[in-house]
Image (cartoon, rainbow, N blue to C red):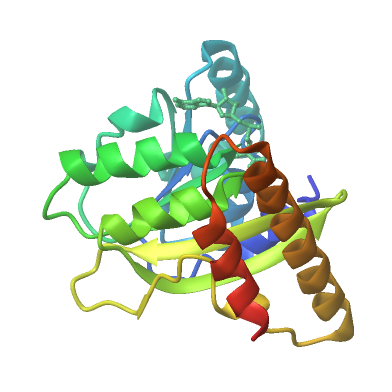
């Protein structure tokens, strides 16, 4: 199964060395299956809340990955209830393809219920990137890597963050390296993402329901 551009980028941000990788909100499990093939040291956990998806996925994994059966597990489970404390070694929790508001809740609950456990999170929200970043900052997480991609006329930020006590960089409220282009094509993606984002918050500001002037200022500052 060929991965989409977005899932490929997420997969490429997974460094070697994790003992457990959690593909949360896995749906058909495409990302987890790619990780299973590439990360031969890792146990891959497929997590989704919909029973029929997990039943179907379980039989597809049994069909195609029977030889790796000791390295994958399916869980029909709410992401908020991940049993991370039952596992040891380095753990990566991937949450992609759901709203930033939901990811905020998941990461907050996981952090609260697993105090003392070192976790990395690889996150790719649909919308609400600013609010998600605010929560990650409040949770004292640090940035390991981030990326911006465009797929099917939609923009996606991907953030690799960590609860490690010897951290990487602070998380920026609007992103940092996502605004640095290494090609003309990426420069174009960045410009259009910035314009779309600014227009979104300017419309919100004009709607007079919330004061988002600080968000507009923060995004304007990335081009200063
Ligand atoms: C659009 S799919 C995302 C698939 C894949 N992660 C991606 O990025 O393409 C969203 C999935 O999230 C699952 N989901 C929604 N809320 C969930 C929760 N609380 N716990 C576990 N899975 C959940 C849905 O059942 C659905 O399969």
Q: Position of residue 24 (x, y in %)?
A: 48, 38
Name the quarter where the N terminus is drawn. top right
* Image spot of residue 90 (x, y percent): 29, 61
- Tally the numbered discs: 0
Which residue is depicted at the point 39% across and 31% down? 79
**In the rendering, at what x and y percent does residue 49 appear?**
48, 20
Snapshot quadrant of residue 126? top right
Residue displayed at 87% across by 48% down = 152
Q: Residue at x 76, y 54 (%)?
A: 199
Which quarter holds ligand 1? top right
**191 relative to 219 in the view: left or right:** right
The front one of 8 and 107 is 107
Any part of residue 39 in sight:
no
The answer to whether residue 74 is above or below residue 150 is above
Horizontal arrangement in the rendering, residue 150 relative to residue 128 (left or right):
right
Q: Is the residue 214 above or below the residue 48 in the image?
A: below
């Amino acid at each position: 199964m060929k991965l989409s551009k977005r899932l490929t980028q997420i997969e490429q941000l997974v460094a070697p060395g994790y003992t457990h990788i959690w593909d949360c909100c896995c749906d058909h499990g495409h990302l987890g299956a790619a990780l299973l093939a590439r990360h031969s040291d890792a146990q891959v956990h497929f997590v989704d809340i919909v029973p029929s998806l997990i039943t179907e996925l379980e039989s597809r994994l049994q069909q195609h990955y029977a030889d790796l059966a000791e390295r994958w597990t399916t869980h029909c489970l709410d992401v908020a209830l991940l049993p991370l404390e039952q596992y040891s070694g380095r753990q990566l929790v991937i949450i992609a393809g759901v709203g930033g508001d939901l990811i905020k809740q998941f990461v907050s609950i996981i952090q609260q219920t697993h105090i003392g456990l070192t976790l990395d999170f690889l996150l790719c929200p649909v919308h609400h990137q600013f609010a998600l970043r605010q929560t990650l900052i409040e949770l004292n997480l640090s940035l390991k890597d981030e990326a911006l991609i465009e797929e099917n006329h939609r923009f996606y930020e991907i953030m690799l963050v960590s609860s490690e006590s010897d951290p990487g960089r602070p998380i920026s409220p609007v992103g940092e390296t996502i605004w640095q282009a290494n090609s003309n094509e990426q420069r174009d993606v960045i410009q259009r993402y910035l314009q779309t984002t600014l227009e979104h918050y300017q419309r919100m500001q004009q709607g007079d329901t919330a004061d988002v002037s600080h968000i507009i200022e923060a995004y304007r500052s990335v081009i200063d």
